[in-house]
Image (spheres, rainbow, N blue to C red):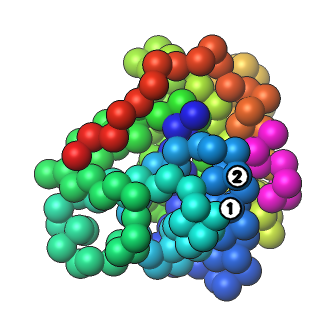
């Protein structure tokens, strides 16, 4: 299974530690983890967790960000794209999506995959949001308000699975896993 993880390049030490534990848990399942490529913040914690557990980690960076060299030197595969839309196209090929704490970029990626699935541009795939420390509580309330005010049906809100504990992440990704997808070969 290829799991795309959205996460920020900042974050408190507790969020970074959570991301490291989640990375190790994903590696333990044999998942191929695809992420934004940074070694900083929550993304860096995820990378250390995956690589520390001998997992497979693919970082996908647009050239402008790759030039900063903020990626782990031991990343399994580093894909450099010309721009952000091409970067995201690599993400959308994954089998499941996990959203960790992050900023505007993380929120953008989450909203886009949710919208693409809603409109039928991609096949339905699990979208799990790790709400450790209540980080995404406001988003959870916003989604509920969207339903309450008639902006979307409950089925659309149900496309997102919020989990509050690290031990709930992998089961949530697996519980919502659609039919097996063809094997993926790293691009690069």
Farthest residue, direction front: 54
Could you tell me residue 149's position as x and y percent?
71, 31
SS at badge 2: helix
Is 61 in front, or is 50? 50
Q: Residue at x 80, y 58 (%)?
A: 166
Q: Counting other residues with Cα less than 10 Å from the Cα at mark 2, is it few (<14), some (14-19), or many (20 or more)?
A: some
The residue tagged 1 is: 24
Q: In this view, does 121 lie above or below 61?
A: above
Question: What is the quadrant of residue 63 in the picture?
Answer: bottom left
Farthest residue, direction bottom: 13
The residue tagged 2 is: 28
Find out whether the residues at labels 1 and 2 contact each other: C-beta distance under 8 Å. Answer: yes
SS at badge 1: helix
* Disc sitting over residue 109 in the figure: none
Q: Which residue is drawn at 29% across and 47% down?
A: 87
In the picture, measured across the screen, residue 142 lies left or right of residue 113, that is: right
Q: In this view, does 67 lie above or below 162?
A: below
Q: Counting other residues with Cα less than 10 Å from the Cα at mark 1, is it few (<14), some (14-19), or many (20 or more)?
A: many
Could you tell me residue 135's position as x and y percent?
72, 65
* Residue 166 within the magenta-colored segment of the rendering: yes
Q: In which quarter of the image is the N terminus?
A: top right
Q: Which residue is drawn at 75% across and 45% down?
A: 170
* Residue 181 within the magenta-colored segment of the rendering: no
Is 90 in front, or is 147? 90
Q: What stretch is highlighted in magenta?
A: 164-171
Give the overall secondary structure of the magenta segment: helix
Residue 19 visible in rendering: no
Is 53 in front, or is 133? 53
Real-space CA distance between mark 1 and mark 2, rounded to the nearest whole angstrom: 6 Å
């Amino acid at each position: 299974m290829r799991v795309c993880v959205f996460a920020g390049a900042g974050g408190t030490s507790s969020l970074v530690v959570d991301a490291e534990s989640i990375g190790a848990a994903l590696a333990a399942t044999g998942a191929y983890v695809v992420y934004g490529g940074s070694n900083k913040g929550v993304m860096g914690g995820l990378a250390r967790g995956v690589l520390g557990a001998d997992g497979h980690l693919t970082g996908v960076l647009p050239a402008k960000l790759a030039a900063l060299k903020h990626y782990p030197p031991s990343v399994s595969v580093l894909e450099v794209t010309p721009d952000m839309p091409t970067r995201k196209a690599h993400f959308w090929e994954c089998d499941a999506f996990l959203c960790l704490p992050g900023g505007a970029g993380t929120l953008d990626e989450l909203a886009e995959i949710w919208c693409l699935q809603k409109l039928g541009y991609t096949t339905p795939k699990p979208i799990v949001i790790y709400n450790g420390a209540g980080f995404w509580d406001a988003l959870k309330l916003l989604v509920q308000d969207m339903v309450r005010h008639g902006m979307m049906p409950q089925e659309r809100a149900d496309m997102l699975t919020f989990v509050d504990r690290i031990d709930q992440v992998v089961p949530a990704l697996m519980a919502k896993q659609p039919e097996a997808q063809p094997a993926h070969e790293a691009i690069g």
